[in-house]
Amino acid sequence: MSKTIANEVDGQVALPLAAGTTTTAASDTVPQTRGPARRPSDIVMMDAATLASAIRSRQVSCLEVMTSYLDHIEKMNPHVNAIVALQDPAGLLAQARERDSQLTRGEWMGPLHGFPHAVKDLVPVKGIKMTMGSPILKDFVATADSVMVERLRKAGVIFIGKTNTPEFGLGSHTYNPVYGVTRNAYDQSRSPGGSSGGAAV
């Protein structure tokens, strides 16, 4: 775990991160994590239905989920270059803590509550760069969500960044002059295909 992310997790008291852990500031009002402690890879490898159930039942916290995904990205993305325009980890962790607070208040947003999510870099997400893999758009920041993104956001998604794509999505291999080449997750000498190569990885 990176030092920054570790400090964010160590400093929070909203939810314990392992079975049997207690907190002094919030132990009377926040349910304790149930079941055995999970390794980050356990969380990352959950399918969507299992993860949604674990979050809603408070078996894992949204902060724990976000931390696991950021750790995984930090470990793997330098080798494959799938995630681009990754947002500030501190801000993402803050959003995850707010999702946990919403659960404490009984405010379940929907089936994707607290899910870290990245959309293809052809789709506008308000406040995040949308380059479409082209130098002419390398500094463009979307001012509004697409309809798809709006619906995902209402369902509880936290947008962590984008996934890489060929320039303007035109190609069966994923590389562009803005973010470079995306590599196959299983064999970095091979292509992940396209135009959704980043998403495929």
Image (cartoon, rainbow, N blue to C red):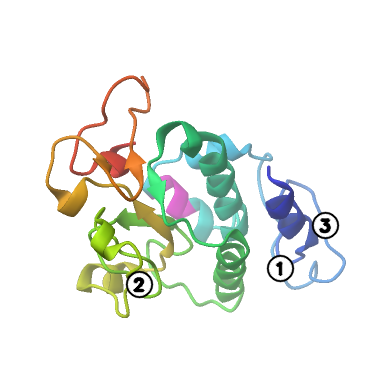
Q: In the image, is residue 23 part of the stretch drawn in magenta? A: no
Q: In the image, is residue 51 part of the stretch drawn in magenta? A: yes
Marking on residue 101: none
- Identify the residue under disc 2: 141
The residue depicted at 14 percent of the width and 36 percent of the height is: 172
Which mark lies nearer to you, 2 or 3?
Answer: 2
Q: Position of residue 78 (x, y in %)?
A: 49, 36
Q: Position of residue 118 (x, y in %)?
A: 37, 55
- Mark 1 or 3, nearer chain start: 3
The type of residue carrying mark 2 is Val
Element under disc 1: loop
> Alpha carbon of mark 2 to alpha carbon of mark 1: how far?
37 Å
Q: Position of residue 36 (x, y in %)?
A: 68, 39
> Alpha carbon of mark 2 to alpha carbon of mark 3: how far?
42 Å
Q: How many marks?
A: 3
Identify whether 188 is placed above or below 55.
above
